[in-house]
């Protein structure tokens, strides 16, 4: 059976610490045409705000995945299709590569691995909260990025590699270099997608584009245009 994300073009990432645009509902959000909703963020995450947002999206016909930023915010909910768990390949602190995961396993005493997939993050915007949080070394050349992508897939068996430019539009050549380095793994791209053109551009290079802040800043019509851009690539 193929993994769900192999058929996706577009993910909408909802931040439990941010509001929707006034007048818009989670029903509207789930009707943007996105292939999946990922719930997560770096700052301001709690088990409670995660649970509320998962519940708010539960009744609509779109898969929901939680992307926890640390073990203490993981939510056990039947509404979830699964967990997408970051591991940050260029983190400055090993805690964000394997340490948090070890703690999660230790605390839980066993995980539902069938519902859990890791995402091999390469964090590339030094201004993003996630870069600061994980002390990521974002000073990477295109060759560094493609080499990390290859190591993620070939050495660590990662099924998903995630180029994370959160808050800024990334470099298409770097995204293409990462795509070229991968054989089977699915390449996610996220950061700064704000319209049809930017979604279309990044979806030419990555398998799946992730749209985040746009839903909180501009709303569902803007997100729907990025879905079109991704699907047309
Ligand atoms: C082991 C478990 C369950 C969790 C650990 C998972 C890890 C390693 C997390 C570190 C990376 C991280 C914080 C991922 C969260 C998803 C993410 C990158 C969100 C984007 O965040 P930003 O856009 O930088 O932050 P804000 O939107 O909160 O400002
Ligand atoms: O908020 P933006 O810049 O769209 O980034 C999306 C996502 O990659 C964040 O984790
Ligand atoms: Mg963000």
Image: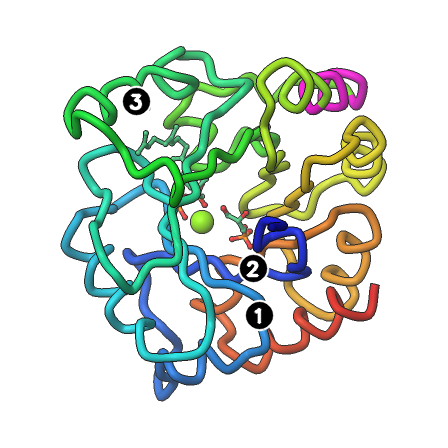
- Pick the front one: 218 or 121: 121
Q: Is residue 143 magenta?
A: yes
Q: Earlier in the sequence, mark 1 or mark 2?
A: 2
Q: Position of residue 193 (x, y in %)?
A: 65, 58
> Vertical placement of 57 versus 135: above or below?
below
**Regarding ligand 1, which quadrant of the image does it lie in?**
top left
> Vertical placement of 223 versus 221: above or below?
above
SS at circle 3: helix
Residue in view at x 60 percent, y 47 percent: 190
What's the CA distance linking mark 3 and mark 1?
A: 30 Å
> Vertical placement of 51 versus 189: above or below?
below
For residue 158, the mark is none
Residues in magenta, as a range = 142-149
Q: Residue furthest bottom?
A: 23
Q: Quadrant of residue 21?
A: bottom left
Q: Position of residue 45 (x, y in %)?
A: 25, 46
For residue 11, the mark is 2
Q: Position of residue 129 (x, y in %)?
A: 41, 36
Residue in view at x 17 percent, y 49 percent: 47
The residue pinned by badge 3 equals 100
SS at circle 2: strand
Q: Main secondary structure of the magenta part?
A: helix
Q: Quadrant of residue 232?
A: bottom right
Residue 191 visible in rendering: no
Q: Earlier in the sequence, mark 3 or mark 1?
A: 1
Question: What is the quadrant of the C terminus in the image?
Answer: bottom right
Q: Is residue 125 magenta?
A: no
The residue pinned by badge 1 equals 34
Disc 1 to disc 2: CB gap under 8 Å: yes
Q: Earlier in the sequence, mark 3 or mark 2?
A: 2
């Amino acid at each position: 059976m193929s993994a769900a994300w192999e058929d996706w073009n577009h993910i909408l990432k909802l931040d439990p610490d941010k509001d929707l645009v006034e007048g818009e509902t989670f029903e509207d959000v789930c009707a943007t045409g996105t292939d999946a909703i990922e719930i997560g963020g770096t700052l301001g995450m709690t088990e409670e705000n995660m649970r509320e947002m998962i519940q708010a999206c539960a009744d609509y016909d779109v898969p929901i995945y939680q992307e926890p930023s640390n073990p203490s915010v993981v939510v056990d909910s039947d509404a979830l299709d699964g967990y997408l768990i970051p591991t940050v390949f260029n983190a400055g602190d090993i805690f964000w590569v394997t340490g948090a995961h070890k703690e999660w396993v230790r605390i839980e005493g066993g995980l539902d691995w069938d519902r859990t997939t890791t995402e091999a993050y390469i964090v590339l915007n030094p201004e993003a909260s996630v870069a600061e949080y994980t002390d990521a070394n974002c000073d990477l050349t295109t060759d560094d990025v493609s080499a990390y992508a290859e190591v993620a897939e070939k050495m660590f068996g990662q099924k998903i590699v995630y180029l994370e430019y959160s808050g800024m539009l990334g470099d298409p050549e770097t995204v293409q270099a990462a795509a070229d380095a991968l054989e089977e793994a699915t390449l996610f791209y996220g950061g700064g997608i704000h319209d049809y053109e930017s979604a279309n551009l990044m979806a030419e290079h990555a398998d799946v584009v992730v749209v985040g802040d746009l839903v909180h800043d501009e709303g569902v019509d803007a997100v729907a245009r990025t879905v079109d851009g991704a699907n047309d690539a």
